[in-house]
Amino acid sequence: MPPLENFSEGNIDEFYDTVLKLVKSCGKLINDKISKAKAIELKSSDIDLVTETDQQVEKLLIEGLTSQFPDHKFIGEESVADGAQCVLTDAPTWIIDPIDGTMNFVHSFPHSCISIALFIDQVPVIGVIYNPMLSQMFTARKGKGAFLNGKKISVSDKTNLSQALIMMEFGTSRDADKMKAVMENQQNLMPSVHGLRALGSAALDIAMVACGAADAYFEYGIHIWDIAAGEILIEEAGGVVMDPAGGEIDRMSRRVLVASSRQLAEQLVGKLAQFYPPRD
Ligand code: LIP
């Protein structure tokens, strides 16, 4: 498989234009289904849901991309749930969460999105996070900036935790140790920050940090598909992505922390009770 430098700007343009068309078309499907009755299945817990729309969107994205780029690989949330491997190689790989915030979608709570990223040589080169219910299209391409509906976005200038709005999630696990860490962090952070917020979607939480509407986000229990598009969005918006204990991001560790600055990230790391889910 050719390394990243062998792909021309024209190649990346073609990948980007193709995925954008597919995402917009899948967004229409989600908007059509959002207020209709949904067939729901349970996955890892009674709050880890999947609907037929999650599965349809992922199938449409994979089929549409495979027809144009037959040698590309995929890591999709629902394909992995059906037994596909969750392995990132150097090959051009699309990493897909067809509906991030499925619980929100089930409740017609308008904070769900399609999150899709393209990695080449294990480097993110394209990221798209689209909330069709609120017409929020977040996009990023390597070296070309981050955008919301075509308007350039950047992280906030907050460097002090006491002035920061922090995104954190409860997640889809009822695991007692996980919940203990979540509650401990809520108690640790409440007195030290401006506020805590949870949208119910990792990708949209990250997008809030990328556009400066929040200042940091962390979560234990996510998967690579929840954060793949957000990673390049944050980097192109001038923020940082790391492990919640402060080291390099490990995309299979199911842990993530993003922030507007390293200074703010390090203050947040200093406050966090850590939790280490089983790796993907
Ligand atoms: C969601 C994540 C979110 C997490 C939720 C859920 P899904 O992904 O984006 O961060 O807190 O529990 O896992 O399952 O809706 O694609």
Image: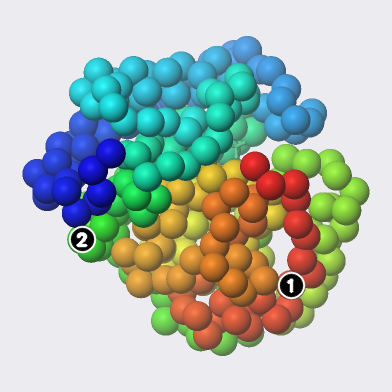
**Residue 237 in which image quadrant:** bottom left
Kind of residue sitting beneath label 1 = Leu
Taking the spot 17% from the left edge, 46% from the top edge, the residue there is: 7
> Going from the N terminus, do you reach mark 1 or mark 2 first?
2
Disc 2, SS = loop
Q: CA distance from mark 1 to mark 2?
A: 33 Å
Residue 230 percent across, percent down from the top left = 44, 53
Is the residue marked by circle 2 packed among few (<14), some (14-19), or many (20+) residues within 10 Å? few
Name above or below for residue 226 compared with residue 48. below
In the rendered picture of this protein, how many numbered marks are placed on residues? 2
Q: Which residue is tagged 1? A: 272
Q: Nearer the viewer, residue 253 or 167?
A: 253
Residue 236 percent across, percent down from the top left = 32, 64
Name above or below for residue 2 compared with residue 74. below
Taking the spot 51% from the left edge, 71% from the top edge, the residue there is: 259
Disc 1, SS = loop
**Residue 154 in which image quadrant:** bottom left
Kind of residue sitting beneath label 2 = Lys
Q: Are marks 1 and 2 in contact (CB under 8 Å)?
A: no
Q: Which mark is residue 144?
A: 2
Taking the spot 47% from the left edge, 33% from the top edge, the residue there is: 75
Q: Is residue 55 left or right of residue 171?
A: left
